[in-house]
Image (tube, helix red, strand yellow):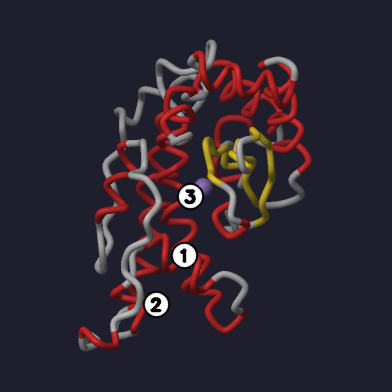
Amino acid sequence: MNPSPAMQPLQRDFSPEPAGVATAILATMAFPYELPVLPYSTEALSPVISEKTLRFHYEKHHQGYIDALNKAIDDTEFQAMSLKALILTTAGRPDKDVIFNNAAQAWNHAFYWDSLSPRGGGEPPAMLKRMIEASYGSVQACKQALTEAAMSQFGTGWAWLVLDGRKISVVRTSDADNPLTRGLTPLLAIDVWEHAYYLDYQNRRKDYVAGVIEDLINWDFAAGNLA
Ligand code: MN3
């Protein structure tokens, strides 16, 4: 059932267009959501993230969140909202936790795919680099903060580089939660759920995080999210 136009909740948020391929595709979708395309081939992040891990993560886990989201919002007023509006509307509402968890994970994973690149690592673009240096003193110190956030997240969750006002910051979130619910602008995401690395690294989360930050992190995507 579609709500009548007069009853339709806010469909648009007025934030800038998302920078990444997968995130941008998802932002244009409405119910029923589909898995957004990956910005690279499934073997492109190897050896840091193997094709086997990437395929399970993308084809099973991310697809699973998309499917569960569609099921949870089918025939509800939430169908008419953008994914971002859906996340913000259901955040902190225990009675809507199934919708929130799957909507946030659908969004977080698109953002994570865009946060990685086979041509990643290296130095951030000049403006982002200056902002990182203003907040952390150096890119190296910022990478260290990101590593510590990823390592100290207990259990499932995420480490994020965010824009907080005009300041670059690092935060971690539990389970499906993301920085949008705190009014922060996400710049980069690192998935630290075990499904992101266990096939390749077992319990060695640190090696996965180090590989991602040194070789895969997509600073261009982060810079594109500064707008
Ligand atoms: Mn994941």
Asked if marks 2 and 3 touch (Cβ < 8 Å), the reply is: no
The three-letter amino acid code for the residue at tag 1 is Asn
- Give the amino acid at mark 2: Ala
Question: What is the quadrant of the C terminus in the image?
Answer: top left
Q: Which residue is mark 1?
A: 102
Residue 114: image location, x then y, percent:
40, 35
Task: State whether residue 78 is above or below residue 85.
Answer: below
Question: Is ligand 1 less than 8 Å from the beta carbon at label 3?
Answer: yes
Nearer the camera: disc 2 or disc 3: 3
Q: Which residue shows up at 43% across the image and 23% down it? A: 220
Q: Which comes sooner in the sequence, label 1 or label 3?
A: 1
Tags 2 and 1 touching, CB below 8 Å: yes
| Mark 2 C-beta to ligand 1 under 8 Å | no
- Could you say where residue 39 lies in the image, as x and y percent from the top left? 31, 32
**CA–CA distance between discs 1 and 3?**
10 Å
Distance (Cα) linking label 2 and label 3? 18 Å
Q: Quadrant of the N terminus?
A: bottom left
Please give the residue where the numbered disc 2 appears in the rendered image. 72
Residue at 55% in and 75% down: 97
The kind of secondary structure element at disc 2 is: helix
Type of amino acid at the residue the image marks with label 3: Asn
Q: Image quadrant of residue 71?
A: bottom left
Mark 2–mark 1 distance (CA, rounded to whole Å): 9 Å
Instruction: Check the image and name the residue furthest to the front.
Output: 166
Tag 3 secondary structure? helix
Q: Which mark is residue 108?
A: 3
Give the x, y percent position of residue 58.
39, 45
Q: Residue at x 32, y 63 (%)?
A: 12
